[in-house]
Image (cartoon, coloured by chain):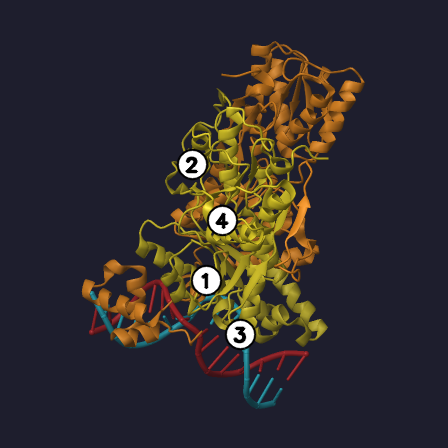
Chain colours: A orange, B yellow, C red, D cyan
Amino acid sequence: MAKKPTVYDVASHAGVSIATVSRVLTRPDDVRASTQQRVLASVRELGYVPSGSARGLAARRTGVLGLLLPDIDALQDLPSAEDSDPHHVEVRRDPPGPSEPSTADFYFDEVLRGCELEAWRQGFSLVISVSRGRSPENLETVLSDLAGKVDGLAVIAQSAPHDVLRRIGKRIPIVYLAGQRRDDDFDHIITSNREGMRALAEHLVDEHGVHDPVYVAGPFDSPDDAERYSGFAEALRSRGINPSALPVLHGEFSRGRARAVAEDLIARDALPRAIVCANDQMALGILDGLVPAGIRVPEDVIVTGFDGIDDSARSTPRLTTVMQPMLELGRAAVRAMVTRLADPDLEPVTTQLPVTVLLRESSEGAMG
Amino acid sequence: MAKKPTVYDVASHAGVSIATVSRVLTRPDDVRASTQQRVLASVRELGYVPSGSARGLAARRTGVLGLLLPDIDALQDLPSAEDSDPHHVEVRRDPPGPSEPSTADFYFDEVLRGCELEAWRQGFSLVISVSRGRSPENLETVLSDLAGKVDGLAVIAQSAPHDVLRRIGKRIPIVYLAGQRRDDDFDHIITSNREGMRALAEHLVDEHGVHDPVYVAGPFDSPDDAERYSGFAEALRSRGINPSALPVLHGEFSRGRARAVAEDLIARDALPRAIVCANDQMALGILDGLVPAGIRVPEDVIVTGFDGIDDSARSTPRLTTVMQPMLELGRAAVRAMVTRLADPDLEPVTTQLPVTVLLRESSEGAMG
DNA sequence: GTGAAAGCGCTAACAC
DNA sequence: GTGTTAGCGCTTTCAC
């Protein structure tokens, strides 16, 4: 790691001024081709790598965007297998079991990929940060630190307290992903939760004659759940069914809880024609409860989910669900930031992304 | 987005010098508690967020680490659904089909998570970058750009040409993930490919009396495959079986290719007692070929994979495989960089991480 | 414990 | 087209 060459080194090596070096690297067209070649040659020869910090400081933009993710896994205290002997290979029977809290549950991977893709296209780097905090002050420090390094920050709902975000939002543009429209100055990217659930429920009523669906809800404070339920209720009302007369069960977005819900329904002999879940995890949990009991899905009971996670296409039967455009969510977020960076005075924009109802065996039965 | 306050603003607001402000933020213990409080108060009041660029420039370290991933998906030309009507919900039948190139194939997600986790612990940010390039020069520019923004770079094998890396490696420490030991000055993190495959093969010979396993290999230029095969061969030799007498088939690490391999084996009536695959994807492909043909696994043919991807635990039967410690790979990478940053003159270090043989139904049959 | 001052390595006016 | 010159906003000696 020899001393790093700077613009000055390149400049004198190429016999030009530092300004010219800078130009060659940022706006090559402003420089005569021959000069350009000379500079580029020096750059290569010296192994020059421009300092991002110096650039960022001088240009007042870092060229980096941030993505803040909620701490789903709470992985923070994982021990590290630092000192095990790599040459000893453990051979172990791995019996089938309740699938561990799989890696693929990290449903934000797709959002992340969308962000990275669009950031790359727009010429930005992407720093990701999982919002874990040992303490609130610590979180605040870490976020402030992050904010100082990026030109804009995309925040997935529930990642950070709004007051912290608001402070940061004073300095750099923030775009808020999912979660309902809020009274803040951020740009928002949301998906058609209500519309999607409405379309799904209408399908159930119209095509399958369902008139007493049970709704399995998420946590009370989930705005997503609230929107989905309201779409559900709208659909029923529009078909002359009174949603308030129908049971709403609570599954907390959890597969295990939902399984218990299903078992309870069976025990009480209270199975409806259809069970509409506020997310896929719970629908999977319902399946976990129904299938072993010999209840046939969808012949006896139709089950539906929401989100379109990978596992929804791997269950038996596969889950009818409403697919969220996760990749697009990430891309839209980056686009929103780039747009705002270009024009900071624009009014806050809310972008709504369409969802798709995916009809599969858990509602339709055997499919072509 | 009002004008951003700087150290100067904070300093005068708090009635101290900028040096003191800086100290409060970086080494609070060097400052009298009362002064500290005053400064902190001003920081909050002004909504001060320190500039990462200025810090990086002055301190000669950015506090950012980079992770470079190979371009598995080649997503770059995805169209964006920018202008569809979010209120229109498409309702569509989604018949079962060959599972699309699932998201979860992105087997680096886990490495990424490991990096993020450890980076966070060590007080670094993490920027990720997928190594796609429209052209070689473009790749070079992008990487150089990246390199300028980070204190160190973790590179997953096959992400970038070695000459480019070597150039960058002159400026910042690079740690190379997976892939065999190489003649470079990088730190390496590798896994026990050879040992893992050897243990697996020994198990097959010793416990299942297999004496004519077929090996399904990856691409010719894959160092991982080479190591795995050598472990395979070692195991057989140690049991008095001559590996060179056994057929090696080529599946290119591809599920589809492997399926064809299986079908060919069936057509030629050349099924062995066991098919050992160099990765899980191919083992899955073998299953794809065997199962529809009515071949029973493992009764007729044992099938094994390598890697321990999520899908290996979701197939029917579930796959016996060798699990790689992906999360640990990421963590070890970050640890290696931090170590080197602290002491740049250390000799290059290669860290080998242990793997685990997971015995499941594709070799053991029904399990407890 | 605190302040003054000198950079860190670039970009962006502004001259020429 | 190219060079000169100010900073950008911090950290870090070195005094005091």
- Looking at the image, tell me whether mark 1 or mark 3 is earlier in sequence order: 1
Give the image location of residue B124, x and y in percent. 57, 61
Q: Chain of mark 2?
A: B
- Residue type indicated by callout 3: Leu
- Looking at the image, tell me whether mark 2 or mark 1 is earlier in sequence order: 1
Give the image location of residue A159, x and y in percent. 62, 46
Q: Nearer the viewer, mark 2 or mark 1?
A: 2
B27 versus B251 height, above or below: below
Mark 1 and mark 2 in contact (Cβ < 8 Å)?
Answer: no
- Residue type indicated by callout 1: Lys
**Side of A210 where B148 appears, left or right:** left
Q: Which residue is mark 4?
A: B243
Q: Which mark is residue A347?
A: none
- Residue type indicated by callout 2: Arg
From the viewer's side, name the closer residue of B64 and B26.
B64
Which element is circle 3 on?
Answer: loop
Q: Nearer the viewer, mark 3 or mark 4?
A: 4
Other residues around mark 4 within 10 Å, as few (<14) / some (14–19) / many (≥20): many
Q: Which residue is mark 1?
A: B149
Q: Nearer the viewer, mark 1 or mark 4?
A: 4
- Residue type indicated by callout 4: Pro
Q: Which mark is residue B257?
A: 2
Q: Chain of mark 3?
A: B
Label 3 to label 4: alpha-carbon separation: 40 Å
* Residues marked 3 and 4, same chain: yes
Give the image location of residue B175, x and y in percent. 50, 62
Q: Which residue is mark 3?
A: B346
Mark 4 and mark 3 in contact (Cβ < 8 Å)?
Answer: no
Which element is circle 1 on?
Answer: helix
